[in-house]
Amino acid sequence: MKYSPPKDIPLSEILPNPPILLMGAGPVPTPPEVKLASSIVFSHLGPTMREIIKRLQLMGQYVFQTSSTRILGIAGPASGAMEMAMASLVWPGRKVLVLNLGTFSARFGDMARGLGADVTELFPEPLSCFKATDVKAALEKDKFDVITLTHGETSCGIKNIELEEIARIAKAMGVKVVVDAVVTLSCMPVPMDEWGIDIMFTGGQKGVSAIPGIALVAFSESCFAEIQARTEKMPHWCLDVRRAWKFWGLGEYHYTAPVPGILALHEGLRLICLETLEKRFERHTQSSLALQRGLQELGLEMYAPEYCRLHSVVAVKNKPGVVAKDLIQFMIQQHHVEISGAFGLDIVRIGQMGEQCRPENVARTLAALKSGYAHFA
Ligand SMILES: *Cc1c(COP(=O)(O)O)cnc(C)c1O
């Protein structure tokens, strides 16, 4: 043998012990049901999987609040679902209006440009979300095929509170509405049918509180029918929704499905159904407000103004003179609690999705943050 095996190091020596409480912008802590489900592997084809997929779609209809049966999983990140959505509706020459509120909203634009679209980006006023009147004006200036927006922009903790109105305006003009609901689905209302959304998606590791590496996307029936009928070539193979429907609709082989991820998602959705959306929204609201009160008591200021503040990822202004990266490392090492930094802005971000919204987790996070700021004061 030319190469010998490296020295054996078991995972137990690498993984942090005690484990880190994940209080950042995702992934989020996994409930026991999800942990168990994601350790199981069995055949991805056959009657057992078929039943699981049907249940998953049924529960998905409740969580997305849609009558559409066109719900698919993707072996990949939430960005994979975003890419499937964009590749379904966008090809060279198509006009896309991207509402750019930050990192994740901007990703739609990157993808659309990669697909050869003619992209127009709209930006909101600083520290605010998009106004339906501004979006309407932009849509009237040109003939767009697709509009994209992120319901909750994780990078800055701002929520597009006028999403419903924006979607209604776009729909009335025949523009397809694609919504990133990664950090809002199951944390706050985003009823797909009622708001007239054509494609909406989430990732396993955020709002729905399953695991990373699996994503979920829903297409409205009418949008799905249009995609079935399109004559332009599909640019992807794995992310081709028509090929993917072979598995998700018919139980046939497309690619080997991510069995543990599907099971994890099944459990994530099942826990949401058991809790009910009403109770879950209320738990998320109360927990996030308690966190925000606690942060204010520590003398910290929220980044986003109250009216458009995202509750599921709370962005907090860092204290002057403290390096956010050092603060986060200190919290991990001393308190085994991890929160997120930011892309460029001097803020830290605390997640309020799923298991993150438990009083003991909020209390531990506030205590760790207090200790961190005291250490660097
Ligand atoms: C995390 C996140 C994504 C991307 O998720 P990945 O799984 O990393 O691709 C997209 N949109 C929003 C709003 C997010 O918070």
Image: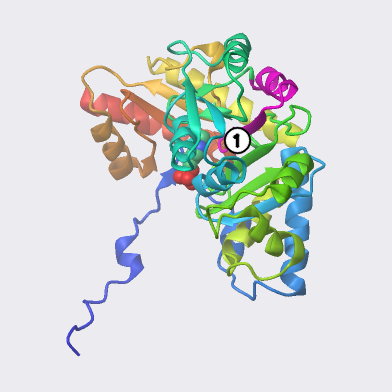
Instruction: Indicate the position of residue 209 as horizontal and vertical percent values.
Output: 58, 46
Q: Residue furthest bottom?
A: 1
Quadrant of the rendering where the N terminus is positioned = bottom left
**Mark 1: which amino acid?**
Ala
Q: Is residue 40 magenta?
A: no
- State which quadrant residue 347 falls in: top left
Q: Which residues are magenta?
A: 163-184
Q: Is residue 259 above or below residue 308?
A: below
Q: Is residue 204 above or below residue 181?
A: below
- The residue depicted at 49 percent of the width and 42 percent of the height is 115
Q: Residue furthest right?
A: 67
Quick check: 320 left or right of 178? left
Q: Is residue 165 magenta?
A: yes
Q: Does residue 132 appear anywhere in the picture?
A: yes
Quick check: 318 left or right of 227? left
Instruction: Indicate the position of residue 173 as horizontal and vertical percent values.
Output: 71, 21
Q: Is residue 298 above or below residue 103?
A: above
> Circle 1 — which element?
loop
- The residue depicted at 60 percent of the width and 43 percent of the height is 85
Q: Does residue 27 appear anywhere in the picture?
A: no
Check disc 1 and report the residue beneath it. Answer: 181
- State which quadrant residue 37 falls in: bottom right
- The residue depicted at 56 percent of the width and 46 percent of the height is 87
